[in-house]
Amino acid sequence: MADSSPITLELTGALERVIGRSHVTLHCSQEQPATELFRRLLHEYPALKLYLGRHDGDDSERFSWPRGFLLVRDSQMLPSSPDTIVYPGDRLTLIQMISGGVA
C-alpha cells in the first residue's frame, strides 16, 4: 500500500469565506478520481454543499463534478470530468467561474 500523502486544496471566493480557511488538507493514499475528492470535501465541510451542488444519496454514491468550478494543478486547468485523477501530494486550487460584463 502506498504512503498517505495529503492533498492540499486551496479554496477561493465564497468557498474560502464559508469555512473561514484558505485551504484544506485531505489525506490521500493513492490516486483517485477528483469527484472522490469533492465527495470527501463535502463530507468534512457540509456548509459547502450550497456552492458545490447537490449530492443525492449516501456517501458511497459517486459525486458528480460541481458546476461552475475549475480545478487547477500547477497552473494547469484539469478537465471537468469524472475521470480526472488526483494524486497523493497534489496541490490543487478550486476556482469558481464567474461571468459578467457590461450591459
Image: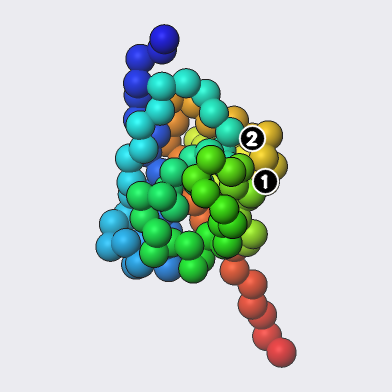
Q: Give the side of residue 83 with respect to residue 51, left or right.
A: right
Residue farthest toward the top in the current orientation of the protein: 1
Q: How is the image coloured?
A: rainbow
Classed neighbour count for the residue bearing mark 2: other residues with Cα under 10 Å, few (<14), some (14–19), many (≥20): some
**Residue 77 in sight:** no
Q: Residue at x 54, y 28 (%)?
A: 32
**Residue 50 in sight:** yes
| x then y, percent, for residue 17 | 34, 67
Q: Residue at x 40, y 59 (%)?
A: 46
- Give the residue type that dot 1 points to: Ser
Q: Residue at x 41, y 50 (%)?
A: 43
SS category of the residue bearing label 2: loop
Instruction: Point out which mark residue 2 bears.
Output: none
| x then y, percent, for residue 102 | 68, 85
- Asked if the residue under mark 2 is in contact with the one under mark 1, i.e. CB atoms within 8 Å, the reply is yes
Classed neighbour count for the residue bearing mark 1: other residues with Cα under 10 Å, few (<14), some (14–19), many (≥20): some
Q: Residue at x 57, y 53 (%)?
A: 57
Q: Quadrant of residue 55?
A: bottom right
Closest to the observer, 58 or 50: 58
| x then y, percent, for residue 15 | 42, 62
Quadrant position of the N terminus in the picture: top left
Q: Quadrant of residue 16?
A: bottom left
Instruction: Point out which mark residue 80 bears.
Output: 1
Closest to the observer, 22 or 82: 82
| x then y, percent, for residue 33 | 58, 33
SS category of the residue bearing label 1: loop
Q: Which residue is mark 2?
A: 84
